[in-house]
Image (spheres, rainbow, N blue to C red):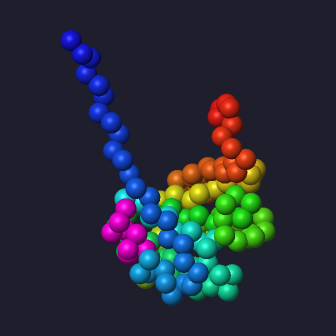
Amino acid sequence: MLAAQPPAPPVRVCVPVCVRRASELADAVARAAQAGDIVELRLDCLDEGERAAARAQLGALLAARTRPFILTFRPDTEGGHSALRDDERRSFRRRLTFEHEGETHAPDFADIELDFDDERQIDEVSKTCGVLLSHHDFAGVPEDLE
């Protein structure tokens, strides 16, 4: 007799939103939410001059979300699309709540790279939303992932 196998965990599809202009965000987020289970908003894809306009939209986008939301602000050294300075990354992580119609909204998760070794700030982010710690090894797969 074969032993019963535990049920497989559900497969979840994360759809990244990577647009250059803030005016493209709402439509891109809506399409991503239709296609996947999780929406990852890649703020590092935005042109530098578009970031303030995008930030102004985040409260409304988060308030209207129908899927879990991940905010990512990744430097080019970690596979991102912008040469971000550490002070820009710190500023992003200090301001993960967004206002819309008198209510405060936060993403479900923030993606933080392991190269950013500031445990105190990671602890602060975790008070606002879930934290995804990521590392991107472009040289290959390490023999011992642990």
Horizontally, residue 146 falls left or right of residue 29, namely right
**In percent of the image, x 72 and y 65: which residue is there?**
76
Q: How many marks?
A: 0
**Farthest residue, direction left:** 1
Give the image location of residue 98, x and y in percent.
Answer: 53, 74
Q: Nearer the viewer, residue 144 or 108?
A: 144
Q: Is 33 positioned to the left or the right of 90 in the image?
A: left
Q: Is residue 3 above or below residue 68?
A: above
Residue 141 is one of the magenta-drawn residues: no
Q: Name the residue located 59 percent from the left edge and 57 percent from the top edge.
A: 111
Residue 105: image x %, image y %?
47, 70
Q: Is residue 95 left or right of residue 83?
A: left
The quarter of the picture where the C terminus appears is top right
Residue drawn at 35 percent across, 40 percent down:
9
The N terminus lies in which quarter of the figure? Answer: top left
Kindly report the secondary structure that dominates the magenta region of the rendered protein. Answer: helix
Q: Name the outermost residue toward the top.
A: 1
Q: Which residues are magenta?
A: 29-36
101 vs 143, nearest the viewer: 143
Question: Does any portion of residue 12 appear in the rendered image?
Answer: yes
Q: Nearer the viewer, residue 126 or 88?
A: 88
| Quarter of image, res 72 | bottom right
Q: Could you tell me if residue 91 is visible in this image? A: no
- Judge whether 115 appears above or below 4 on screen: below
Identify the residue at horizontal 70%, vertical 58% (top origin): 78
Question: Residue 141: horizontal and vertical position, in percent?
Answer: 66, 40
Residue that sits furthest to the front in the current view:
140
